Structure formats: C-alpha cells, structure tokens
Image: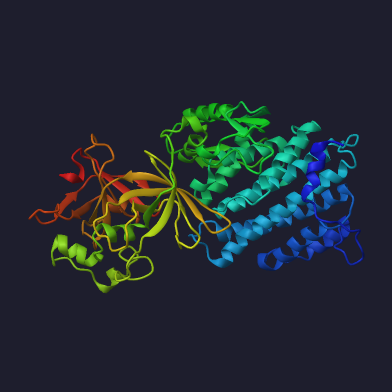
Amino acid sequence: MNPLYRKLNERFPERIAPTKQSFQTEARALGQWIAQLPLGNAMAAARPLLAAINEISTLKIDGYQRLAALEMLRGPIQQMIAQADRQVVGSSFPLPSAKYQLGLQSRDFHAAMALGYTMAAYEICSPEGKVPFLKGKPVAMALGRALAHWSEQLLRGYLLYASPQSGVWKSMHDLIRFAQSIQLADKEYDDPLLGKASVTPELCYKQSLLFAISNPYRLSQRDMLDAFDACRSWAQYAVLKPGGGGEFALPLEEDRGPGYLPEERQAGAGALLSFSTEGVVTYLERELSIAQSMNATLSFKLRNGNAVSLGQDLIRRAMYCWKPVFDRMHQRLGAGHELDTLIGLTALHYHLANKTDFESFVRDIRGPGISMSERDRSASWTNNSGGADSSRPIATRARVLDQGLGGYRLEWSSVSGAKAKIGELIGMAVTGENDEDDERDWMVGAIRWIRFDADGRVEAGIELLARQAVPAAVRPADGNGVFKTPMRAIELVPLKRDDNMATIVAPSIGDKAYSRIEFSKPAVHFSDQAGKTRLQTDVEVLENTGAYLRLAPRDAAGLTT
C-alpha cells in the first residue's frame, strides 16, 4: 500500500452503514432536500447544511457517491459563506460575538468539505491507493477540491486574524504528496464556482502557499479577499519542486506552512519540497511596468475564470513579503523583556501630555480663547475610548518576542484585555514600577500585522515611527477657510538625525480635511516661552491607515520652525 495514501485517513471519523433514518445522499433525494432549504435566510439554512455534511462523513458510502453529493452541496454552502462574509468583512475588532460565530461557522463549513473530499479520494483509490482505470479526473478533482477548501478554511481564519487550526497544514501537505505520488498533481478539472476555470491540485496548494507568504495578517479583510483570489492566478507562475533548496522550504512532516513572517521561515531537516516565487515576481513586475497610470488597477484571471482587480499598492505590498529570511531589511534580535504599551492616539496623547485631559492641554498651549462645546467634547475624535477625558487610559504590558531597527514583534497575554487592529497607533515605553511614573519616554509605532492565538494571546508586528514624540493639537480648516475645533495630534521626532522634517499624526477624518491646518504644541521644558502655533497651508498626506493620518509639511523646514 502507498504509505502516502495511508496518511490520508489518519483523521477520518468512524463510519457506519447508512440506514433509512440516515441522511440521504442519492442524487434525487439530495436534490429535493436542497430545494427545500431556505437559502435566502443564512441563519436558518446554515445549521442543517453543516449537520448534513458532518453526517455524510460518518456514513460508509461509495467514493463516487460521496463525491457527487459534495458537488451538489458545494454551491449552497458557498452561498451561505458569501452571506456570512458580508457580515464579517469590514467590521471593527474585536468582533461582536454574533459576527465572530459566523466567521467560525464559515471556517467549519470549509473544514467539513475538505474532509469529505479527502474521504472521497481515499475511497475511490481503495484499497491500495491506486487510481482506477480512466478515473484520474475524479480523483484529481476530489484531491484538488480538498486542497481548495482547506485553503479557504485558512482564509476564513485569517479574516478573524486567528492562527491556523491544528492539523490544517499537515492535511494539505499529505494531500499534495499523495497527488504527486499518483501523478495527478497537475491534472486539470473545472471549477463551476470559479466561472468554470481550469485548476489543478498543485495550483490550489500553491495558492495557499503564496497567500501565506504574503502575510495576510497585515492586510485588511477586504484586501485579504482580493489578494487571495489574485494568488490563485499568480500561482500559475510559482514553482514547486522536490528538495529543500528553494526560496521557501516546506516542512512536510510538520503542521505548518512556509511561514507568515521571515523569522518563521526556517526549514527543518525533513523539508521535501521547495517553493519559488521568482516566476511570479517576474510576471508581476512586467504587468506593473506596462500599467500606464500609477493609480490604475490590474486584473488577473485563470483561463475561463472570473477576473479580480487589485490596486498596484496592494500588489507591491504582497511582493515585498515574498522575501526569504536573509533578505530582511533589518536584522531581528531575540528579546523576552516587557514593554508598557498604549494603543490608540487618545491614550498616547494623554500620557505624552503628562496625563492631562485634552481640553486642559489646549488651554495650556492656546490660552482660554479656544474652548470646546459639549458637542465637541462628546465627538469621537476628542474622547478617550470608552468614555470622557476623565476616564484615564492605562498602559498594557506586552512581551517583546523579537526586535530590530525597524520595530518590534509584541505579544499580549490573554488576560491583558488588549484590543488592537491593523493600522492603529501604539506607544511603547520601558516598564515602570507603576502607572504613576510621569517622566517616561514613549516611542511611537504603528501596528502593521496582527494575529490572535486560540488561547487568547495577541501577537502583533510594530513598525517604529519615532523614538520621541510631542503631544500637540491641530485645527483643520473647512472649505470656507474657517478653522474647526482642535483635535489631538502628535508630532513625531525624525528617527534619523539628518532628517530635519518632523511629521505629525492626527485623527483620520479624510485626506482633504488637512490641506490647511493650524498646528500647536507646548513650549520646550524649562523655557519661559508659551506654546508654539503655526499655520501650515501646504500639507502632504504620507499615510492614511483608517485609524490615523500621518502628515508632513511640503516645505523643508517642516513643523519644527
């Protein structure tokens, strides 16, 4: 018996012969059952659909019959998942419980389908793991469908910023190795859910690898969906070959992928496959060079498949992640010490201002001439998260997993209560004996990727923006030139000494709102001077994360004059 074939059934449930009370998998009966489902109501239809798939996996039925039943259920299930995605994608984190459960349900759907297709391939090739005469296409389709659903299962976890579930990557490794051993890894079959695109088991596997090394944890949910679909097309140009000498070595006996981060891309001695993106990079660089406009989107599709359009910035961000560990810009050093962290502009401003509420801070630097109405005080961009200025933001302790000149990799424990999201501003300082330590130097960074572990721990990658920062206030002008109510801002001291241009971060209320601003900051310590106020009429938006904007004056003197 093929030893790789035997590996496929390691996670199969116990199966029993079907009875009259069992779920009916015969085509006519199953078709009638599907027709009666209330598919317009995802909440009502999802539960019986998931129960049906799980029950089918407990029945001893013919492999071809199992494959046919799963093919009939695949369309309705995709419809349920699409409805759930519309509820989950675009939501703020942490997700409300109802939406989080929808995300978990979508992940369960794909896991159940992947298991079912694996069982179908195993049963068709029974008992020795050999492909029956002229049955290569259904076997390849069953193996490819299993790989595709495992890949989609990983995606639904990424949409929740959750770590992969145990066993998923190992199952995918086992499937592709078996497909290669029976010479069906490159066997084509059609996928009706992709516009009848022609796919192969290897293409489905390479898609999951390419998306993983793009580090989905640094993408927004919408970008994840677009990049995932694009990776299916790009995977045509990636190369999978025996041995571990390529750009990315795959540890096929381990339950992990190629690594989401450079420091996770350390291959073990058991790596049997290597994955190369050189062909993908060459193809995308050519497509990017052909684009006439920097703002033009690029479209990608498989033969007979549906097209997906991506912005050039998203493509470049994905390509940037396709670097082996030795190509990293800054060397990473092991750590283990702890830092106090402040998440969000409001919390960081409060501590930089020596725990002064924002209204008092504005009065100190601008005098009593500027005040805020009750409406202004209740606005989201003047408040602390969760309440008024009297609610003091408290620093949260995080452990440094590793660090480099460019930033940190942090981990918050499950009891920390840390609530973070991609693109959020974060302050970091050496731990103090207590939270009353006023004279603390807060570094400023931005959360570039985030991942939630099953035990509740939060891991995040932080880009360092500044080692020193100054609390400030900014007043953008409206279209008529009238200045609005002051908002919190932070001036970032340049990281490099030869860079004399400071930048500021301010609430994200729209790029055009900051074309003309009035910027105020406190006087230097131990000085008799009052706070500085400057009118800036030419401002460049360097970054808009959705949580904050990073701005810079276009003149060389910047805001430091």
Please state the horizontal and vertical placement of residue 524, each as a whole percent of the image.
Answer: 14, 52
Asked if residue 4 lies left or right of residue 474, the reply is right
Please state the horizontal and vertical placement of residue 532, each as a whole percent of the image.
Answer: 14, 53
The residue at the point 82 percent across, 43 percent down is 121
> Which is nearer the eye, 297 or 439?
439
Q: Quadrant of residue 358?
A: bottom left
- Count of residue discs: 0
The residue at the point 72 percent across, 65 percent down is 47
> Which is nearer the eye, 336 or 221?
336
Residue extending furthest bottom?
A: 374
Asked if residue 547 lies left or right of residue 22, the reply is left
Residue extending furthest left?
A: 528
Placement of 242 over or under 558, stated as above or below = above
Asked if residue 467 lies left or right of residue 41, the reply is left
Q: How is the image coloured?
A: rainbow
Asked if residue 399 lies left or right of residue 183, the reply is left
Q: Could you tell me which quadrant the C terminus lies in?
A: top left
Q: Could you tell me which quadrant the N terminus lies in?
A: top right
Placement of 213 over or under 431, stated as above or below = above
Placement of 428 over or under 19, stated as above or below = above
Q: Is residue 188 visible?
A: no
Q: Quadrant of residue 498?
A: top left
Q: Is residue 101 visible?
A: yes
> Which is nearer the eye, 548 or 428?
428
Please state the horizontal and vertical placement of residue 378, each as a whole percent of the image.
Answer: 32, 70
Please state the horizontal and vertical placement of residue 216, each as a whole percent of the image.
Answer: 54, 45
> Which is nearer the eye, 188 or 298?
188
